[in-house]
Amino acid sequence: MSDIPWSKIFAVTPFDLVKVLLTAVIILFVTKIQLFSDKLSALLIALPLTSLLAMIWMWQGGQSSQRIAGHAEGTFWFVLPTLPMFLILPWMMRNGWSFWSSLLANCLLTTAFFWITVVLLRKFGIDLMPK
């Protein structure tokens, strides 16, 4: 963590504000659609809009194709351990769990699934979390 350029991370540019605004507008738009169609909002959320935006912002920021490709590949592998949450959370809520209890349990499960994924993929030469 000592080689993370924290000063660059916390420096905010005008373009950063545009990115935040555009990203927030997309999230707001989807939550407004949810008011009348949970299926359409689910479809829109399932689209990798934030990943696409992140890659566009990376390209605009001068990141290399290799770095963007690495980001896309890492996103693929990290999406997999989140998928069970979308089945377990509704099951829990339909079986009497409160929203917050279900959410907390699923956050903990997803964290465990992330680390299981990291450990399993290392056995196949894919290192998502360099030591």
Image: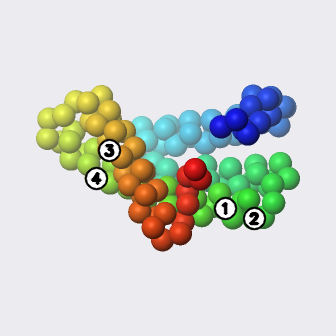
Q: CA distance from mark 1 to mark 4?
A: 28 Å
- Gap between marks 4 and 3 measured at Cα: 12 Å
Q: Nearer the viewer, mark 4 or mark 3?
A: 3
Q: Residue furthest front?
A: 131
**Given contact means CB atoms under 8 Å apart, are the residues at marks 2 and 1 in contact?**
yes
**Label 3 element class:** helix
Answer with mark 2 or mark 4, whichever residue precedes in sequence.
2
**Cβ atoms at labels 2 and 4 below 8 Å apart:** no
Type of amino acid under label 2: Gln
Residue 109 — which label? 3
Q: Quadrant of residue 83?
A: bottom left
Amino acid type at circle 1 is: Gly
Q: Nearer the viewer, mark 1 or mark 4?
A: 1
Residue 43, disc: none
Residue 52 at x, y = what percent? 65, 56
Q: Residue 31, percent across and down? A: 49, 38
The residue at which mark 2 appears reads as: 66
Q: In front: 91, or 41?
A: 91
Left or right, residue 1 beside residue 118: right
Image coordinates for residue 48, horizontal then vertical, percent:
56, 56
For residue 70, the mark is: 1
Name the residue nearer the viewer: 97 or 107.
107
**Label 2 neighbourhood size at 10 Å, few (<14), some (14-19), many (20+)?**
few
Element at label 2? helix
Q: Earlier in the sequence, mark 1 or mark 4?
A: 1
Q: Residues within 10 Å of mark 4 (few under 14, many from 20)?
A: few
Say the numbered circle drawn on residue 87.
4
State if disc 3 and disc 4 touch (CB < 8 Å).
no
Q: Secondary structure at mark 1?
A: helix
Task: Please name whichever residue, 42 or 92, is drawn nearer the observer in this view of the structure.
Answer: 92
Q: Is residue 4 left or right of residue 38?
A: right
